[in-house]
Amino acid sequence: MKVQSLRVLVETKVLEEGWMKQRYKQLTLIDEKRASAQYHEQGYQKRIARAFNKKVKPRNLKEGDLVLKVLRNETFDPRGKMKPRWSGLFIIKKIMSGGATRIANLDGEKMLCPFQMDRP
């Protein structure tokens, strides 16, 4: 909404009565503007999700499968060497809802936090 300053109102010689009517009209339309903005945002989020989900490849993993874990930190070494992007073999111990899994290394030591397995 546009709120004019008192100086602008005095210079344009707008009557207070007309200003009040215009202001009331703007305030009554604010709910409609808010609703249209919310519908626009929901549509935008659906379009972004659809575009992102095109790239997601479903993986048919089950408990006992061997997997590699992606290292998401910086892969460049200051000495000019490339660091590995994957971390050694892990066994899937439990698959939870939403694509999260609990993994353990080959010695059977479980990792503390679950990992999301359905990222591209």
Image (cartoon, rainbow, N blue to C red):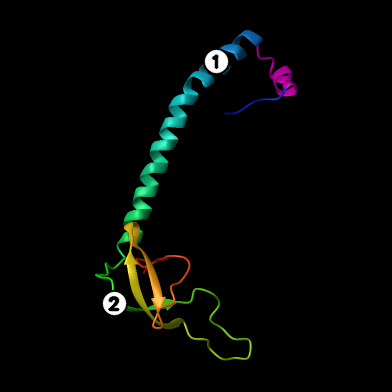
Q: Is residue 90 left or right of residue 31?
A: left
Q: In the image, is 13 to the left or to the right of 73?
A: right
Give the residue drawn at x 56%, y 12%: 21
**Which residue occupies 58% across, 17% down?**
23
**Does residue 43 sit above or below 48 in this rendering?**
above
Q: Quadrant of the N terminus?
A: top right
Query: Going by the picture, which residue comes out furthest to the top?
Result: 17
Q: Main secondary structure of the magenta part?
A: helix
Q: Which residues are magenta?
A: 6-15
**Which is more toward the observer, 29 or 42?**
42
Label ID, residue 65: 2
Q: Residue at x 61, y 14 (%)?
A: 19
Question: Is residue 10 in the magenta section?
Answer: yes
- Give the SS element for disc 1: helix
The residue under label 1 is 24
The image shows residue 17 at horizontal and vertical percentages of 62, 8
Is the Cβ of the residue at disc 1 closer than 8 Å to that at disc 2? no
Q: Residue 100 occupies which quadrant of the picture?
A: bottom left
